[in-house]
Image: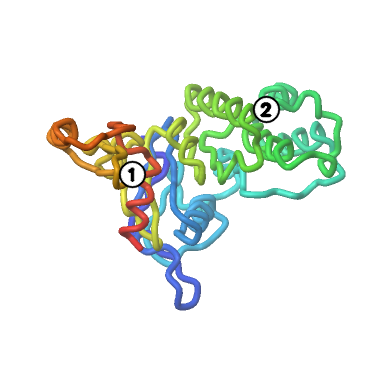
């Protein structure tokens, strides 16, 4: 069953078209990644799906309802981690998570959520005293305490150290295994590759590619051959690396640092947004 269905989504700000005919489908239980440079339309799209921003065209269904007309019961099925929440500075971590839990009809136990987000040692600390990364963990705790069917994560690990990021990845994998559908936007391509079952790349308000992290943009069709010789470093993208390797082996000049690698998600992403631009 599709949790998110979008067809022909459009949004304009004056003469500027921020979202230009996007089509997306996210199935139940997926972790769906949304990639794109700043200004690509990611945040506008997510805010429309969350019901916070009206659209100018297209059809949108989230958990079977139109976000612009859905009511409180529909909202109780969502969890949202926005880019940067700064409210409740004088509340403690425990007070904040319990406060948000009170908005939902059947929330998770706040104490277990605090522990799951690595906040037990900070449960009595006021939010204004926390580091940026720890404050971000509180945002995540508030996003999942309602036990949502659909969780929106907008740049969730900004400010996390490597250990905290890995712990967060484990949490997201556990939530997905429990059946939570997750829409993730992130500038960390390794994060999207580690977590997403499928992803879409936006540029200029349009979807320029969609697929799994392993095959998007024809990623598995090409290899990168790199080497160094007396003229400097070289890098060639090719679907057939063997003939090139044979040519390099037969050369009389020395070839060093020879490598054959699949294209990374970063390679494909940069190519896609460069072509779109």
Q: Quadrant of the C terminus?
A: bottom left
Q: Quadrant of the N terminus?
A: top left
Q: Position of residue 75 (x, y in %)?
A: 58, 44
Tell me the residue that label 2 is attached to.
117
Residue 110 appears left or right of 123:
left
Residue 53: image quadrant is bottom right
Question: Residue at (55%, 28%) from the top-left corner?
Answer: 169
Question: Residue at (64%, 29%) from the top-left corner?
Answer: 164
The circle drawn on residue 233 is 1
Q: Position of residue 58 (x, y in %)?
A: 37, 61
Residue 113 appears left or right of 267:
right
Residue 194 appears left or right of 157:
left
Number of numbered labels in the structure image: 2
Of residues 181 and 271, the one nearer the viewer is 271
The chosen color scheme is: rainbow
As drawn, 141 above or below 273: above
Q: Position of residue 226 (x, y in %)?
A: 30, 38
Q: Secondary structure at mark 1?
A: strand
| Mark earlier in primary sequence (2, 1) | 2
Residue 6 appears left or right of 183:
left
Mark 2 and mark 1: Cα distance apart in space: 45 Å
Crowding near pointer 2: few (<14 within 10 Å), some, many (20+)?
A: many
Q: Position of residue 115 (x, y in %)?
A: 71, 22
Of residues 60 and 257, the one nearer the viewer is 257
Q: Secondary structure at mark 2?
A: loop
Of residues 261 and 175, the one nearer the viewer is 261
Question: Residue at (36%, 44%) from the top-left corner?
Answer: 267
The circle drawn on residue 97 is none
Q: Are marks 2 and 1 in contact (CB under 8 Å)?
A: no
Crowding near pointer 1: few (<14 within 10 Å), some, many (20+)?
A: few
């Amino acid at each position: 069953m599709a949790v998110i269905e979008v067809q022909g989504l459009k949004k304009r700000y004056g003469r500027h078209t921020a979202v230009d005919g996007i089509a997306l489908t996210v199935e139940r239980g997926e972790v769906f990644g949304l990639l794109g440079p700043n200004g690509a339309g990611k945040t506008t799209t997510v805010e429309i799906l969350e019901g916070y921003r009206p659209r100018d065209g297209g059809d949108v269904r989230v958990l079977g309802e139109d976000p612009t007309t859905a009511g409180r019961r529909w909202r109780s099925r969502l969890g949202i981690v926005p880019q940067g929440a700064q409210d409740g500075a004088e509340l403690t971590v425990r007070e904040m998570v319990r406060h948000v839990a009170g908005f939902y009809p059947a929330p998770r136990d706040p104490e277990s959520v605090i522990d799951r987000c690595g906040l037990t040692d900070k449960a009595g600390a006021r939010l204004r005293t926390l580091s940026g990364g720890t404050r971000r963990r509180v945002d995540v705790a508030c996003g999942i305490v309602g036990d949502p069917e659909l969780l929106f994560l907008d740049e969730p690990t900004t400010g996390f150290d490597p250990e905290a990021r890995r712990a967060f990845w484990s949490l997201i994998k556990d939530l997905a295994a429990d059946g939570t559908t997750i829409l993730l936007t992130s500038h960390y391509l390794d994060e999207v590759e580690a977590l997403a079952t499928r992803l879409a790349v936006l540029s200029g308000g349009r979807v320029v590619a969609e697929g799994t992290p392993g095959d998007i943009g024809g990623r598995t069709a090409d290899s990168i051959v790199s080497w160094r010789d007396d003229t400097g470093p070289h890098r060639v993208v090719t679907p057939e690396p063997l003939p090139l390797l044979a040519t390099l082996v037969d050369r009389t000049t020395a070839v060093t640092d020879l490598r054959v690698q699949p294209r990374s998600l970063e390679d494909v992403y940069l190519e896609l947004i460069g072509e779109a631009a």
